Image (cartoon, rainbow, N blue to C red):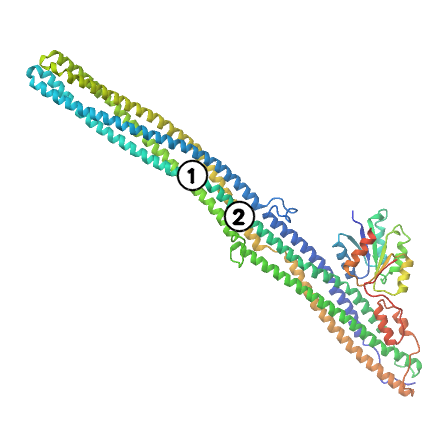
Amino acid sequence: MAKLSTDLVLNKDLLSKLENLESESEKIYLNLGQRFPELFKELEQGFAESGQLISYFAAGHSRAEKLEENSLVEEIITEAKEVIEEAAVFFNEMQKRDNVLFSSINEGIDHLNSLDSRIENIREDSIEMELISLNAMTVALKAGLAGRAFSYITDELKKLSSRTIIYTEELTGSGASILKDFLEFRKLVGEIQAFQHRFFGDFQERLNKCFDRYNMGVKRLAEMLFGVIEEAKAVKNPLYRIMEEVQLQDIIKQSLEHVLLSLKEFDLDPKSEYNEHLLDELSFVEKIPRLCQDLLDDISRKIEQSRDLFSVNLADIRSTLRDVEDQRGAFLGYFTDQGENELEGGALEQMFAESVGVLLELLSGIDRSMTGKMAIGRDGNGIIENITVLKTGFENFFEIIDRFYAIEVASRIQVAKQEVLKDRTETVNEMTRLTIRIDDDVKEALRILKDALSKIYRIINKYSDKMEMEMSVVKETADSIKSSYDQLMFSKTTLADTLKNFSVYSERFLSLLDASEGDILNLGMLVKVITEIRDELADVQARAEALKKEVLLEMGLQEWQIKDDKLQTMIERFTIFSHKKVAGEIGGFEVEEGSQEGDLTLF
Amino acid sequence: MAKKILIVDDSSTLRASVEFTLSEHGHEVLQAGDGVEGLEVLKGFEGKESEIGMIIADINMPNMDGITFIKEVKKTTFKFIPILVLTTESQESKKIEGKEAGASGWLVKPFKPEQLVAVVSKFLK
């Protein structure tokens, strides 16, 4: 019995390596197969959440309609506009009331101007009365004893006239002071009126313009962020391609099973005799490593193809992630004005600052207007007090007038009684005429003052009453505007935070992606193991060929054609047509034709 | 209510890939690892057979192969449900075997997602 010069037994580790390879490849592909649907789920959730977040700010956006009907910014701006609309109506009414006050003040000034001429009349008449008294006094002195009483009367008249002159000068001073106060009052009211007209006249338009610009800016930003989401969806295609490739594991597994199946047929008795059967066996076993090598090459190619496809597509995903992150950064710039590009009309923060600036200006304007109104009330009351004092002054005049009348009566008696004074009748008549004129002027001045006082008193009182109501409404309006301001600040802060943290890819998505990259690296390890197995099989093949040569030499033969169909029988258990074909080529036999991968037959 | 699709295959990655492809197109997918499990899943739908729209089955599986599975299905109340064979086997003799067992179609692995979706839509009509 011949003995083979060398053993041709397979290293058991080889089979273990192949079995490990099968389970490892299944594990890696299965990991990918399980992670990628998860990645998709995370992705869809991320898209939906970020979409909702954006539409929270931008109502009416075509893509947002399905998510949220009302936006935060739109709601806040609508409310603020309503507040401003109400404020505008109120301030308009307030201005109308102020206009009434202004025209009443003008009327009051006209009245006080006419008072001045009355006082002047009284003063002139008093001077004339003084002259008359001096003339009469001269006559009385000339009349001697007969004119003594008359002399006393004319002295009294002179004193009274002098007092009247001084008094009218005092009243003139008081009247002029009141007039001056009144003119200043009118100036104050006029200034406040002009300020209100200028300020409240266009603030609504200005504010609405700012609000609209801010709202449009937010919407434009939302459009951009929706654009980011659309861009982010670009990762879907690489994910689809990876998922499509994952099914290759099924084919790799079957291929490895073919290798295992072939190697398990590797069964050579080391004690075999040199005969035809041994040559048949050696011819079979020398083909097995080659077949297995070809199959392993195919598996290796497929794994490398998978690895490359996974790597390329993961690189595409990473590239999309970077692009999306870059865009997000740029849009942060749109908000803060730090980016290279700007939204039409400037950065959103600037638009917001404009809106807030006008709101603050409005609050300051309201404050200024109210301070002015309080000054009007205060000054108005001061004027009323001064007019009341002036009125009292004129009322005191009646005592003087009574004295004039008394002197006039006494004079008339003396002229009638004393013959020497008879030619003084005309002087007394003149005294009477002047006394009546002074009386009339004082009465007229008093009437004017009473009129003015009553009118101004009524207006100032009405104004003060209205002012109390206005102050209360203005306070409410100012509170509402402050609330709108706070709301806008809230919208801005929320928007800034959203932008800062805006991400369409969740943390879980990114961590799943990292893990997938680890799996892909492991595919490279599989290829390395396949190369090691392939090298071992090359060694086995070399030993088989050497043994066959040894047996052929011993049997005196040059070559041997395999006589049995062990290989054909074995490949019947192969499930992949291309592998059968390879075996046919190695074994030199025909195999039944099969269709290509992806071929569909409908029965 | 959308009809369910049962995928019977011993490769969990293949099942995951099929489920992903079909669920992305709005189909609900049920899974079984071999013919025996496949029959058990179907048993759970006895009396509500119409809920199952189609079956996709591999041929080479442990415990019960695809051909036996198809033959067994054809003996049940699910016999009218179309069965698409999804396998690496591509030889004509195998296809004839499948057709005789009662399969409605034969698709050689690996599949293109759009192709699978098109076949499923055709069978579900």
**Circle 2 crowding by C-alpha within 10 Å: few under 14, some 14–19, many from 20:** many
Front position in the image: A335 or A198: A198
Label located before the other in sequence (1 or 2): 1
Dot 1: what SS? helix
Q: Is residue B20 visible?
A: yes
Whether residue A389 sits left or right of residue A523 in the image: it is left
| The disc label shown at residue A213, or none | 2
The x and y percentages for residue A61 are 62, 48
Mark 2 — on which chain does it sit? A
Q: Are marks 1 and 2 in contact (CB under 8 Å)?
A: no
Q: Which residue is mark 1?
A: A197
Q: Quadrant of residue A472?
A: top left
The quarter of the rendered structure image containing the N terminus of chain A is bottom right
Q: Amino acid at mark 2?
A: Arg
Q: Residues within 10 Å of mark 1 (few under 14, many from 20)?
A: some
Residues beneath discs 1 and 2 located on the same chain: yes
Q: Residue at x 30, y 23 (%)?
A: A447
Q: Give percent across and percent down for residue A324.
A: 61, 59
Q: Quadrant of the C terminus of chain A?
A: bottom right
Image coords of residue A73 (percent x, y): 56, 46
> Which quadrant holds residue A35?
bottom right
- Tag 1 subunit: A
Q: Residue at 88% of width from left, 77% of height from top?
A: A284
Q: CA distance from mark 1 to mark 2?
A: 25 Å
Q: Position of residue A352 (x, y in %)?
A: 51, 49
The dot on residue A473 is: none
Against A258, is B82 above or below?
above
* Residue nearer the viewer, A441 or A171: A441
Up-down relation of residue A124 to residue B57 (above or below) = above
The part of the image, by quadrant, that contains residue B72 is bottom right
Query: Looking at the picture, which amino acid does disc 1 mark?
Result: His
